[in-house]
Amino acid sequence: DIQMTQSPSSLSASVGDRITITCQASQDISNFLNWYQQKPGKAPKLLIYDASNLETGVPSRFGGSSSGTDFTFTISSLQPEDIATYYCQQYENLPFTFGPGTKVDLK
Amino acid sequence: EVQLLESGGRLVQPGGSLRLSCTASGFTFNIYAMSWVRQAPGKGLEWVAAMSRRGGTTYYADSVKGRFTISRDNSKNTLYLQMNSLRDEDTAVYYCAKQGAEVVVINAYFDYWGPGTLVTVSS
């Protein structure tokens, strides 16, 4: 199975800050990498698909990029409604696997 | 508006069985692959099973293979998960999720999710 790691596991930031989350795959997954946002008690929501494509309706402050087996998720200007846990997910191989999540809260 | 609604979760004893349902609306159900994803209390997300648009292809996580069966009834816009030989570690919120294409392994992003249904396995 492809293992996904995320860093950091949690972070605290202020409104307006730029935040970055990294996801690393244990092997090459091309750009078959998606990012989700999950708020407490809610279902996950797709934000980014195929490493860098913004899902329809998602604010442009969210972004994704890739470099080899390393993937980066960015919020350019953190908003209060962005407080959530963020997960990456690969679909290069079955089983589809998720990263352990990064919890983002306000400083 | 795309909607997915899971049902069937409840408290069940270890070794028991349960069938979850997911009713879809707001999109053409029979042209998309579908998956089940679960989340144990306080834990991360785990993909469980997936099925192609017509049901001809299914895939399972090793942790549920041989115990769980995914199926669909396109005439009823409904996805199912039959869960047998349940274990304590199957306790989780189970989400059904729409995929981005008809084939499981293509565009395998989960673009719509239901609110989830809680399965608790305990004696």
Image (cartoon, coloured by chain):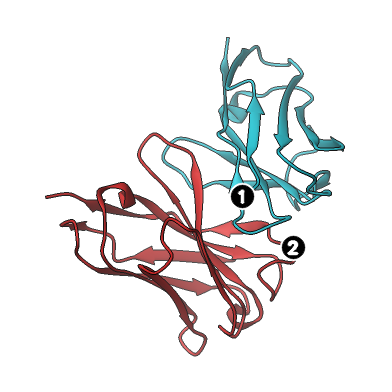
Chain colours: A cyan, B red
Q: Quadrant of residue B81?
A: bottom left
Which mark is drawn over residue B52? Answer: none
- Say which of B47 and A21 sits in front: B47
User: What subunit carries mark 1?
Assistant: A
Q: Amino acid at mark 2?
A: Asn
User: In the rendered structure, are the residues bearing label 1 and label 2 in contact, judged by CB atoms less than 8 Å apart?
Assistant: no
Q: Is residue B111 above or below residue B52?
A: above
Image coordinates of residue A68 in percent, x first then y, are: 87, 37
| B54 horizontally vs B85: left or right | right
**Visible residue check, residue B79:** no
Q: Is residue B79 above or below residue B112?
A: below
Front disc: 1 or 2: 1
Q: Report crowding for label 1: few under 14, some 14 to 19, many 20 or more residues within 10 A (C-alpha).
A: few
Image coordinates of residue B16 in percent, x first then y, are: 19, 64
Image coordinates of residue A35 in percent, x first then y, are: 68, 42
Residue beneath label 1, please? A1
Residue beneath label 2, please? B107
| A62 horizontally vs B30: left or right | right
> Label 1's element?
loop
Q: Report crowding for label 2: few under 14, some 14 to 19, many 20 or more residues within 10 A (C-alpha).
A: some
Measure how far apart labels 1 and 2 are at the Cα level.
19 Å
> Label 2's element?
loop
Image coordinates of residue A15 in percent, x first then y, are: 67, 15
